[in-house]
Amino acid sequence: NINNLGMQELSVKSAAAGGTLRLKSASSITGAAADRLLSAAKIEFNGIAGNIGSADQYLKVATDALTAAADGSIYLDNAHSSVFSDVNAGEDIRIISAADIALTDVAAGGDIEVESADSLDADNLTSGGNLQLTAEKALDADNVSAEGEVNLLSRLGDIAAGLINAGGNMDITSGGSLDANSLTSGGNLQLTAEKDIKLTTADAGGSLTADAAGNLTAKDMSAGTTMNIASDSVELDEVTSGGDMKVVVNNDNIFGALTSKEGNIDLTVNKSDA
């Protein structure tokens, strides 16, 4: 246990524990140098009145499990495969991970930014600002919401998205396929996949753009303004736009109910098998 009861910032050189490492501070906790490492089977940051780490120097950790609570912001650099749960900050949360990471019950009064050099699993994340999740490989996200923008990016893997809400714009880009259950954006919604896109429900307050190199399936999709859809093959039903709707498909297509409330519908099919 490390307790800092004074108002002076706690600068940690290095610490290692085979069990649980607990840190508490009446001010901020930072690393004494960029290469300093906190290593333990579990790390708990309890009642940090200031920041954990800093924007200029993230606090390096190596742990199987981590919990954290800070009145200010949280900046962590994770060294190996970990589960981060019950991570709460009054301001921003920014995490980078050299390995796969799972996040559960994470909340920030400001922005949330997480980047993994491997896979990323996120469940129950709430941001008072913008939220960005980036994974080199697979990205799974569910029960994710932000007052501002939401950006999900998987550079080389698939994205599985459950319930995702953004008060502003939403941008989801997959280096593989995108499978989404419920997407709601107060602003524009941009979906891009190097393979297939499968949508159960997608609702954009502004424009909606979906671009899939493979197949695109959507059964309940709406946009407050314009909608643009492009894919190799499509299966669409119950698709509605407030303005113009444009659909471009190269091969197989199945069109159900397509509605443009105050605009035109432009369908371009290079090869029709329907």
Image (spheres, rainbow, N blue to C red):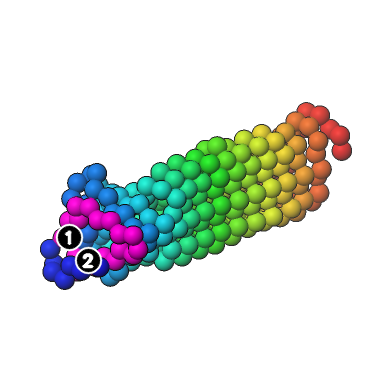
Question: Looking at the image, which is closer to me, 117 or 273?
Answer: 117
- Which residue is drawn at the image coordinates 41% and 66% (left, top)? 86
Q: Mark 2: which secondary structure?
A: strand
The magenta region covers 9-27
Q: Is residue 32 magenta?
A: no
Q: Residue furthest front?
A: 18
Q: Is residue 17 above or below residue 267?
A: below
Q: For mark 1, what is the residue? A: 10
Mark sitting on residue 134: none
| Residue 54 placement (x, y as % from top left) | 25, 52
| Residue 268 placement (x, y as % from top left) | 75, 33
- Which residue is drawn at the image coordinates 66% and 34% (left, top)? 213
| Residue 204 placement (x, y as % from top left) | 59, 53
Q: How many labels were placed on the picture?
A: 2
- Which residue is drawn at the image coordinates 55% and 55% (left, top)? 141
Instruction: Tell which tag, 1 or 2, sits nearer the viewer.
Output: 2
Q: Is residue 26 magenta?
A: yes
Question: In the rendered structure, which amino acid carries the disc numbered 2?
Answer: Ile
Quadrant into which the C terminus falls = top right
Q: Residue furthest right?
A: 274
Question: Looking at the image, which is closer to me, 169 or 32?
Answer: 32
- Which residue is drawn at the image coordinates 86% and 34% (left, top)? 273
Image side of residue 47 versus residue 78, left or right: left
Q: For mark 2, what is the residue? A: 2
Principal secondary structure, stretch drawn in magenta = strand
